[in-house]
Amino acid sequence: MNTIETNFVLDAKGLACPMPIVKTKKAMNNLEAGQVIEIQATDKGSKADLQAWAKSSGHDYLGTIEEGDVLKHFVRKSSGEEAVERKHESVTDNDTLAGKLGDENVVVLDVREKAEYAFKHIPGSISMPFGELETRADELNKDKDIYVVCRTGNRSDMAAQLLAEKGFTNVINVVPGMSDWTGDVESNVK
């Protein structure tokens, strides 16, 4: 059994469309940006419904795990700040990072939440959620080129700034990040 860290679990078992979405919308109002909700449903149509709703509302649909008759859907609440101005001066794109994979001097640092990383991440990347970066930065090698990824480039921008403030000189923010990554991926979810 897989254990995905979430901030809130919503029981929508036994409810038919549109009730899982109605309850999810209400629960999302009590979450902070970046937090992950697990919606437990038995309605087989809930997967497509929640995926479409998340996309239309700007939230990040992470994936679904089936456990018997229960579908466990995972959605990350967006910040609504997807177009925030980036400040870290060293920025690159996904294609450039893809070309650097395999270079022993390159570290891919994924600063998304653990649930996001569990469903899909770049092979060989290091998971260090942004909220943990302040206390865990010393685990990184300052001599390596650190390519920082998140979903859209916003958290990775803040992470790159934080690392630069801590004396890291070879930090590159990857934009747009995992939302548009077409290279190889791994999943910890089976």
Image (cartoon, rainbow, N blue to C red):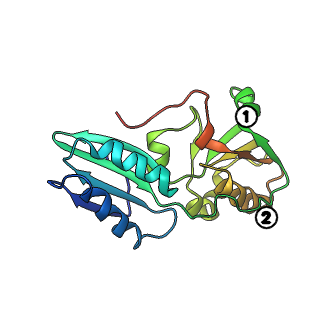
Query: In the rendered view, would you say 24 is above or below 145?
Result: below
Residue 137 is drawn in which quadrant? bottom right
Quadrant of the image containing the C terminus: top left
Amino acid marked by disc 1? Leu
Residue annotated with mark 1: 97
Amino acid marked by disc 2? Glu
Residue 184 is drawn in which quadrant? top right
Left or right? Give the position of 122 relative to 42: right
Q: Which residue occupies 85% across, 54% down?
A: 89
Left or right? Give the position of 139 relative to 167: left
| Alpha carbon distance from label 1 to label 2 | 23 Å
Residue annotated with mark 2: 165
- Secondary structure under tag 1 reads helix
Q: Which mark is residue 145?
A: none
Q: Residues within 10 Å of mark 2 (few under 14, many from 20)?
A: few
Residue 19 is drawn in which quadrant? bottom left
